[in-house]
Amino acid sequence: MLRPLDVQVDPLSSTPPYDQIRMQVIEAVRTGALTPGYKLPTVRRLAEDLGLAPNTVARSYRALEQDEVIETRGRLGSFVAATGDATHRQAQLAAVAYADRAKSLGVSPDEALAIVRAALGLPG
């Protein structure tokens, strides 16, 4: 049974529509609402459903593909990637890159963690 892609765009939000779509798809994959292999609507169909320009939806799909959340199979369409939680994997890679950079700059582990906590808006 196919589940509809439940995406909504808030035109009053300060977040651009393409990013709203991207974040909602990532969250749906993360929570399991969209499973690997799920076929996404075509760019034109989703743009029409949301009342957006096709280029806006295409930009979301390109970003999702770059983050390995979805994969495009030519004329067959776009699907949720079968590689597991790509967003978690990307976050791990970013964390390793940050740790390496902080070490190379001579930043102590405690200071590096404090920087991350501040960037995430968490209390020190």
Image (cartoon, helix red, strand yellow):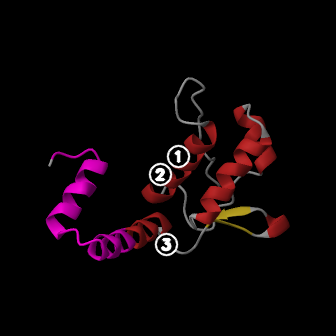
Q: Where is residue 86 shown, x and y percent of the image? A: 49, 68
Q: The residue tagged with tag 2: helix, strand or loop?
A: helix
Residue 54 coordinates in the image, percent (x, y): 79, 42
Q: Are marks 1 and 3 in contact (CB under 8 Å)?
A: no
**Residue 6 in view here:** no
The circle on residue 84 is 3
Distance CA(mark 2)–CA(mark 3)? 13 Å
Residue that carries the numbered disc 1 in the rendered image: 24
Q: How busy is the neighbourhood of tag 3: few (under 14 within 10 Å), some, or many (20 plus)?
A: some
Quarter in which the N terminus is drawn: bottom right
Residue extent of the magenta highlight: 95-123
Kind of residue at disc 3: Gly
Of 37 and 115, nearer the camera is 115
Q: Note whether 111 is above or below 93 in the view shown.
A: above
Look at 53% across and 28% down and name the residue there: 13
Residue 72 appears in view: yes
Q: Which of marks 1 and 3 is nearer the N terminus?
A: 1
Q: Does residue 94 appear left or right of residue 23 in this picture?
A: left
Q: Residue at x 63, y 43 (%)?
A: 18
